[in-house]
Image (tube, rainbow, N blue to C red):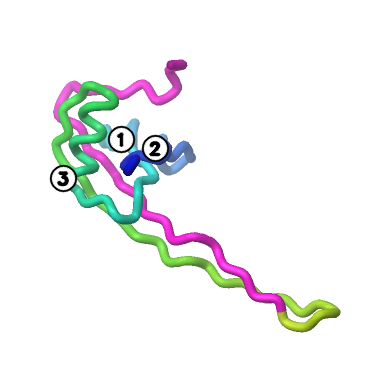
């Protein structure tokens, strides 16, 4: 099971990085905070101070077509906000 899916790169995530030193990641919905902490420490070589998680419910949309009502939904997402120890930095834009 891959815990970290990808980093979240948005205006709000960049603002939190500059303001608090927090980084946002999309993670596996079945991963817990301990697994997320270990995965970030192993992948980026930093010390994690705190992990906050949020689960986003799937969004359902529907529209009427010639064939009737078509219903679709997005996937469930889990986002983790990682606060690093004092002086630690992750370079998300580094090319590996």
Residue 30 shown in magenta: no
Q: Measured along the vertical axis of the image, is residue 70 above or below residue 33?
A: below
Looking at the image, tell me whether mark 2 or mark 3 is earlier in sequence order. 2
Q: Which residue is painted at 28% across and 37% down in the image? A: 22
Looking at the image, tell me whether mark 3 or mark 1 is earlier in sequence order. 1
Quadrant containing the C terminus in the rendered view: top left
Quarter of the image holding residue 64?
bottom right
Q: Position of residue 86 (x, y in %)?
A: 15, 26
| 29 on left or right of 46 | right
Q: Which residue is painted at 26% across and 50% down in the image? A: 31
Marks 2/3: CA–CA distance: 25 Å
From the viewer's side, name the closer residue of 28 and 85: 28
Residue that badge 3 annotates: 34
Labelled disc at residue 19: 1
Tell me the magenta residue range: 70-96
Which is closer to the viewer, label 3 or label 1? 3
Q: Which residue is painted at 36% across and 41% down in the image? A: 25
Given the current orientation, which residue lies at the most extreme bottom position? 68
**Element marked by disc 3:** helix
Residue that badge 2 annotates: 15
Q: Position of residue 29 (x, y in %)?
A: 34, 55
Residue 82 shown in magenta: yes
Given the current orientation, which residue lies at the most extreme top position? 95
From the viewer's side, name the closer residue of 65 and 47: 65
Q: Residues within 10 Å of mark 1 (few under 14, many from 20)?
A: few
**Element marked by disc 1:** helix
Q: Residues within 10 Å of mark 3 (few under 14, many from 20)?
A: few
Q: Are marks 1 and 2 in contact (CB under 8 Å)?
A: yes
């Amino acid at each position: 099971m891959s815990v970290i899916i990808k980093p979240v790169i948005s205006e709000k995530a960049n603002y939190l990085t500059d303001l608090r030193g927090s980084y946002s990641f999309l993670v596996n919905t079945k991963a817990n905070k301990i697994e997320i902490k270990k995965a970030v420490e192993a992948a980026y070589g930093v010390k994690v101070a705190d992990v906050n998680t949020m689960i986003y419910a799937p969004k359902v949309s529907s529209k009427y077509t010639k064939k009737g009502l078509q219903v679709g939904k997005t996937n469930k997402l889990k986002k983790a906000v990682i606060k690093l120890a004092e002086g630690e930095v992750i370079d998300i834009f580094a090319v590996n």
